[in-house]
Image (cartoon, rainbow, N blue to C red):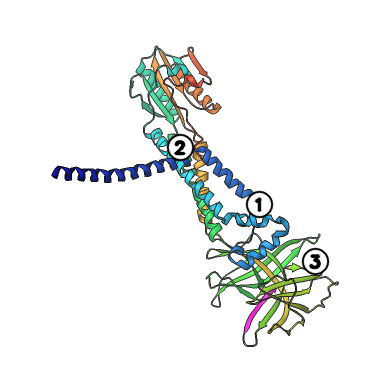
Amino acid sequence: MADQAIAESDVYVEGGMGSDGDRNVAGSELFHWLYRFFYSKTVGLVLILAMAAYAVIGSVVAQAGPNVYSDPAQRESFLESVRENYGAWTGVLDAFGFFHVFTSVGFYIVVAMLALSIIACTSHRIPELWRRWFHPRVHVSPKFFEKARYRGSVATDSAPADSLESARAVLKQNRFRILPDDRDPENAIYADRNAWSGIGTVVAHISFIIILLAFVISSRWGISEDLAVPVGGEVAVGHDTGLTVYAKSFTDSYTEEGQAADYVSELELRRDGETVAEQTVRVNNPLEYEGFRYHQQSFGVAADVTVNDGETTVFEESVPMKWASEEGANAVGMFELDEYEIVVVTAASGRADSSIAPGTALVELYPADTDTGEPLQTRLARQGESVELGGLNVTFERERQYTGIQLRHDPGAPLMWVGFTLLVLGMSATFMFPYRRLWVRVDNQRIRFGAVSRLDTSYQRLFEKIIQEVAEHENAETGVVIESEKLDPSEEADGQPEEENHGQGA
């Protein structure tokens, strides 16, 4: 009975350990499968093409504004505005997020997978770079010098040690690192230059990840809004800044052909009534403060409107007259309240064919939650006059100029600059300091040189230069042989080091 109990206990313990071991093996196999999947060049290429496809879609398909999809009413209004262009495809494009591709779930998935692919390719590359710098292949067989893509020899009467010393001296002058052949140090050496430059590919790959991260941060948390600031008035910046932007003045100038040449706003930023920043703002000269930029974007005419519900003032702002009627005779502006949408219409500047008299505004009241196209009420209001619509007193105070300011906040910009800097450094290291290596062996009164590399005329010139300098060092006027050819891959197996691969992964 005791033996049986021990046997059952043994079976139980072994079974438990086996289950854990199976789970560990399964987890390890899954990890290695995912790793192989992501460092596949095919996967990397497919993901890059997917990114390109999203970029094309974002350029071809109409894109909603930054905050449109956060407001259901604005979203529906946007979809209605594009439905006449896309028809029945509108719902399909919306479902796939193609009206806001750079903040869509699909785009984020592609970005995440591309980042994982870059990480896998980079980590797969690092051991090779480590071996290149710390453990290069210093020994090749004598047959290698007969089959190397770049090969040459110099006749010598010197002793092997002296001949190797001549080669060392020339290679040092050409900035090569020299290591002895670990199997035949008395007759052979290995030399390389810029073995460290492979780190450039790692830096470049890291820069791609940083750039992708910066793009996601900016697309997800960035701000791009239009502020219509009346000249002599101020509007709140919002976004928990506690700031208001005040337009002291606005000037515009025109060419002889009547086109806008320049427009300039004198802006002040205020907090609690105190001016914290001020600047003359032009199109390419924004005001910057606390991570926000205020760009000059447009200008136009605004209508100062006050709305009172009988007890309190519910609206008191300048309404930009951003739109025009179909015939262009009238300027149109609008704003929303809780239950209503109010449209203000005035005669367009310089138009005498408007049915609305100068100094007068047509005020139209629409329900906020429907799109009937027909106003509930309309009233004409003279400047300074109040009219009653839907239980609200609407006062058309006056018309005045406004300056259109684009508010921008780009939290990913610092990371983007870091990424681009690393990209330039990495690419510069890779292409300006190419990895070069060669092997030297002395036998049978000849100094033999051999090297492998992709067909490269600049390296071929360097290789020939080194051999000629060694020949001069040895005073060898004859017996200099230099050859280069493209080998049959089947001949490279015997003692032939692998060629350096400069096209790493994704």
> At which x and y percent is residue 413?
53, 56
Does the magenta-highlighted stretch encompass residue 314? yes
User: Regarding mark 1 in the picture, which secondary structure is present there?
Assistant: helix
Does the magenta-highlighted stretch encompass residue 332? no
Say if 160 sits above or below 459 in the image. above
In the image, 294 versus 327, the foreground residue is: 327
Amino acid type, callout 2: Gly
For label 3, count other residues whose C-alpha is less than 10 Å away and answer few (under 14), some (14-19) or many (20+).
Answer: few
Q: Residue shown at 74%/64% (left/top)? A: 253
Amino acid type, callout 1: Ser
Q: Residue shown at 78%/79% (left/top)? A: 360
Badge 2 vs badge 3, beta-carbon distance below 8 Å: no
Q: Which label sits in the foreground, 1 or 2?
A: 1
Can see residue 320?
no
Residue on which the image places disc 2: 198
> At which x and y percent is residue 2?
13, 45
> At which x and y percent is residue 184?
33, 20
Cα–Cα span, label 1 and label 3:
28 Å
User: Regarding mark 3 in the picture, which secondary structure is present there?
Assistant: loop
Say if 132 sits above or below 304 in the image. above
For label 1, count other residues whose C-alpha is less than 10 Å away and answer few (under 14), some (14-19) or many (20+).
Answer: few
Residues in magenta?
312-322
Quarter-wise, where is residue 356 in the image?
bottom right
Can see residue 355?
yes
Badge 1 vs badge 3, beta-carbon distance below 8 Å: no
Q: Which label sits in the foreground, 2 or 3?
A: 3
Residue on which the image places disc 1: 59
Q: Earlier in the sequence, mark 1 or mark 2?
A: 1
Badge 1 vs badge 2, beta-carbon distance below 8 Å: no
Outermost residue, right side: 353
Residue on which the image places disc 3: 326
